[in-house]
Image (spheres, grey):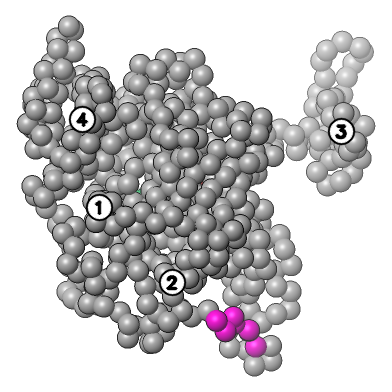
Amino acid sequence: MTDKYYTLAEGCPFASASTSVQVRRGQGVGGLGLLQDTQLIETLAHFSRERIPERVVHAKAVGAYGEFEATADCSDITSASFLSKAGKKSPVLLRVSTVGPESGSADTARDVHGWAMKIYTDEGNQDWVFNNTPIFFIRDPIKFPSVNRSHKRNPQTHLPDANMFWDFHVGNPEGIHQLLHLFSDRGTPASVRTMNAYSGHTYKFTKEDGSFKYIKIHIKATAGVKNFTREEATRIAGQNPDFLIQDMFEAIEKGDYPTWNVYVQVMDPSEAERYRWNIFDMTKVWPHKDFPLRQIGKLTLNRNPRNYFADIEQAAFSPSTMVPGFAPSADPILQARLFAYPDAARYRLGVNYQQLPTNAAKVPVYCPFQRDGFMRFDDNYGADPNYVGSSLKPTKFYPEVKSVQPKALSLLTEHEKWVGEVSSYESHVTDEDFVQPAALWEVIGREAGHQDRLIGNLAAHLKGVTSTKLRSEVYALFARVNKDLGSRLQQATEALVAGH
Ligand code: HEM
């Protein structure tokens, strides 16, 4: 029983929420509706409009609140306040999703899993929009819609389509490293609580003097990584398509709070010049032996959403949401993402999406040159100037915050001097692109049965490919990683195709 009294949306008290007004003859069922029945009209009209556009990718998700605690003073590498001293805590919102399937789909489906995290710091919001894999399928952002469509539904049959999937990847083989991850055990996490996440991209930690380090972030489950086998994931998808959501909700509800340790790999710009791997190529990792992990924090989830729509569905994350001390690198995928997410949020939630409670910073926001628009629900900066450079009421700026000032530029290394031709970049795939996948195949081999499971997962998917030519091309692609992998994959797949 709630202690609140029912009203219409405009606040007017009303006697009943379960009877429409009708012109009636006698006592039986039957009567004409009236345009004056505002309550009925509003109830139906609002229902027809209660969906907002589903995210075009990452639609199905679980979310929760918690806190990020810095475990060290990181002021030697970043000026970010939330990392300035051990023990400093900032509230967090986390949303973990599958990528391709729709909002109603099974969350144990084999897929990359997204990790979108908003850290409400004392210098505004810091979003980490990561995945549970440290690499990505592509290195040119123009391919993003294509890779996703090839993983989603066929435009004619409206069915997931193995032909489309593998046709894309054979034609764009730079994704081989990510494919190995996806079809390994890690493609089907047993719980969000036992999943790791990675920035994938190179980002920058910056300091007020303009110096910077390249970094990659790793978030590791303290409970260790646990995954389902293909058979388990498929069975659970049928029995409980919301398994991951339920698992996390119930764990938090009973006080079994999931935790992660957060690390960075740190690279000096001078090292980037000489490094074997292009640090702006998202199909590559920095091996830990070259760049060891340094712990910067700890993450705990300890509060479930009060309302899924308000807290999680309306959440908008973007790699462009950054505090001073954190900056993007020249990874072209990241550069494109800096545009794509706020653009998606303006479409999905409206131009004032930053005002929604779940997205709002927990520090005062004063951005008077961004005004008006649909669904503005604060005082819209009242009478303050809506133009820059007012001498009548000058805008105040935080003195300690510097953007890219000339002083900072003078500290840039060769690696960040962008002078060159304007041209398009053809991403040729060479043997070098198969070196890290080959190493990953070896690592997978250290765990009993994992190589067999990976081959089984691939074969189960590949058997849906109806073109023998395309299947052969896929075997050839995996044989470039490792000959044995290629031939075992061929054997396993052809046996399934033949119905053995
Ligand atoms: C060119 C490359 C990419 C583009 C254009 C792109 C674009 C998008 C778009 C449009 C959304 C939906 C956003 C919304 O409706 O609010 C999204 C969601 C997401 N993307 Fe990407 N993406 C790219 C690559 C990546 C990469 C490399 C990662 C991880 C390292 C990633 C992680 C995520 C996550 C976690 C979400 C879900 C965000 C949420 O929970 O609201 N994406 N992406």
Can the viewer see residue 57 in this picture? no
Image: 381 above or below 440: below
Q: Residue furthest top?
A: 500
Residue 289: numbered disc: 1
Q: Looking at the picture, which amino acid does disc 1 mark?
A: Lys
Instruction: Identify the residue at image location x=18%, y=7%.
Output: 499
Instruction: Identify the residue at image location x=8%, y=24%.
Output: 487
Quarter residue 485 falls in: top left
Tell me where residue 267 appears, x and y as whole percent.
30, 64
- How far is mark 3 from mark 4, CA to CA? 58 Å
In depth, the one of 193 and 333 nearer the eye is: 193
Tell me where residue 157 appears, x and y as whole percent.
32, 24
Image: 46 above or below 327: above
Q: Looking at the picture, which amino acid does disc 2 mark?
A: Asp
Q: Which residues fall within the magenta stretch?
A: 394-400
Residue 2: numbered disc: 3
In depth, the one of 303 and 238 nearer the eye is: 303
Q: Which residue lies under the disc numbered 4?
A: 445
Instruction: Identify the residue at image location x=25%, y=52%.
Output: 289
Q: Which residue lies under the disc numbered 2?
A: 76
The answer to whether residue 24 is left or right of residue 222 is right
Mark closer to the chain start, 3 or 2: 3
The answer to whether residue 1 is left or right of residue 469 is right
